[in-house]
Amino acid sequence: METRTLFITRSDLERLQELLNQQRAKPGGGDYLAKLQGELDKAEVVDPKAIPAEVVTMRSTVELTDLDTGGVEVYELVFPDEADPTKKKISVLAPIGTAVLGYRMGDEFEWKVPAGVRRLRVTKVLYQPEAAGDWDL
């Protein structure tokens, strides 16, 4: 799989860094925090008004296709306190949530999850707050 540039808005980066600092103060969870920090460290920071509409940002709704099974899943990427699996709201701290942040429509990626390694493609970005002009989310 080819390496792509990950994009993140400055406001998402600031909130996520604050979240990471809070989570580090709690016991356990070092592995997933390190993975999210690694993603943030390699991301290109973009002004919210300049981020391309096909990039997955916080609170985006995204369609993912499993490259092994062909299955399609739709998730909204949210902060941990908003996560609700029954409503397909996935935390950025969940393995797939961390993985999809910053990728563009069409990007493919592999990510280790508790059940093994998933190979996914960002099929569609159904909603992105920045593209919709929703700056206060």
Image: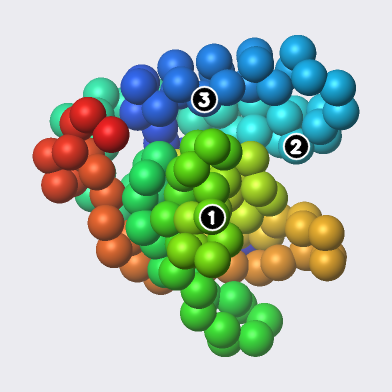
Instruction: Tell me: residue 107, above or below residue 17.
Output: below
Mark 3 element type: helix
Measured from the top left, where is residue 119 in percent x and y? Answer: 66, 68
Mark 1 element type: loop
Q: Residues within 10 Å of mark 2 (few under 14, many from 20)?
A: some
Measured from the top left, where is residue 14 in percent x and y? Answer: 44, 17
Q: What label sits on residue 39 in the rendered view?
A: none
Of callouts 1 and 2, the N-terminal one: 2
Q: Evaluate whether residue 122 shows in this view.
A: no
Q: Which residue is mark 2?
A: 32
Q: What label sits on residue 16 in the rendered view?
A: 3
**Which quarter of the rendering shows the C terminus?**
top left
At 29% across and 63% down in the image, what residue appears? Answer: 126
Instruction: Tell me: residue 37, above or below residue 5.
Output: above
Q: Which residue is mark 1?
A: 84
Residue reaching furthest left?
133
Q: Residues within 10 Å of mark 1 (few under 14, many from 20)?
A: few
At 35% across and 67% down in the image, what residue appears? Answer: 124
**Which quarter of the rendering shows the N terminus?**
bottom right
